[in-house]
Every structure is written in C-alpha cells, then in structure tokens.
Amino acid sequence: MRRGLAWLGGALGLAAILRLKRRAGGVFERPETDPADELRARLEQAREAPDDRDEFDAAEGQPVDEVGEARSIEERRRAVHEQAERALGEMRRPDADE
C-alpha cells in the first residue's frame, strides 16, 4: 500500500513538472543572455570611460595626491585619543543653560 502511494505521488509530481515545462515554454532552458557576458560588456565599457578623477577630486576640495604626509599608527592613535578626550570633556562639562 505504501509503495503504491509513493509511486502515485512520484507520478503526480512528474506530471506537474512536465505540465509546468510545457506551459512556460521550457522551464529548464538556459536564458538567452549569459550574465557573465553582460558583466564583461559592462566592465569593458567602464574601462573605456574617460578618467574623471581630477573632476571628482576638485569637487571634493582637495586632490587625493595632495592630502599630506602619511602619519604613523602611533600618531593616528594619539590624535584619536585626544579627540575622544575632548569629546568626553565636553559631555562632562555642565551646561549653564540648564
């Protein structure tokens, strides 16, 4: 009895899959356009685009090439620590308005 139900369920499932395939015009077919080809075309288009880095830097105010000297990790840590201490001092300071 159980085998018969299993075969019946399998047959109904197969019939449903075949019906969907016929209705959709081929569910198991590959898409007409390959996503990899589309990506390659977009990358090629981006490579051919003009370099607008100078315009972008001008809009930002200071070009990346002229940012300044690189600081060491210790200098950056010290600067962040000092900034945090200033912020904490401002938060702890009682306001005269209250």
Image (spheres, grey):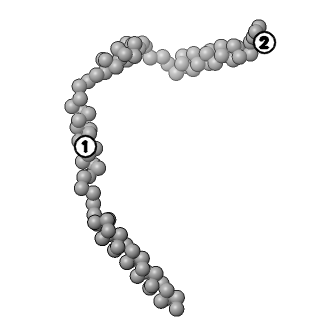
Q: Earlier in the sequence, mark 1 or mark 2?
A: 1
Residue lying at the far bottom of the rendered structure: 1
Residue lying at the far top of the rendered structure: 96
Q: In the shown orientation, is residue 94 left or right of residue 42?
A: right
Residue 97, how many percent across, how many down?
A: 76, 9
Q: Secondary structure at mark 2?
A: loop
Q: What residue lies at 24% left-to-right and 33% top-to-bottom?
A: 47
Q: Secondary structure at mark 1?
A: helix
Q: In the shown orientation, is residue 49 left or right of residue 5?
A: left
Q: What residue lies at 37% left-to-right and 78% top-to-bottom?
A: 15
Identify which amino acid the numbered label 1 is placed on.
Answer: Arg
Residue 14, how many percent across, how many down?
A: 38, 77
Residue lying at the far left of the rendered structure: 48
Q: What residue lies at 42% left-to-right and 76% top-to-bottom?
A: 13
Asked whether 74 or 37 is in front, the reply is: 37
Q: Is residue 45 above or below residue 51?
A: below
Q: Is residue 18 above or below residue 83?
A: below
Residue lying at the far front of the rendered structure: 23
- Tell me the quarter of the picture where residue 95 sits: top right
Identify which amino acid the numbered label 2 is placed on.
Answer: Glu
Asked whether 94 or 9 is in front, the reply is: 9
Q: Tag count in the figure?
A: 2
Q: What residue lies at 32% left-to-right and 68% top-to-bottom?
A: 23
User: Would you name the residue on which mark 1 appears?
Assistant: 40
Residue 78 visible (yes or no): no
Residue 65, how many percent across, how many down?
A: 35, 16
Asked whether 23 or 3 is in front, the reply is: 23
Identify the mark at residue 54; answer none if there is no mark: none
Identify the mark at residue 98; answer none if there is no mark: 2
Q: CA distance from mark 1 to mark 2?
A: 62 Å
Q: Is disc 1 surrounded by few (<14), some (14 to 19) or many (20+) residues within 10 Å?
A: few
Residue 79, how many percent across, how many down?
A: 57, 16
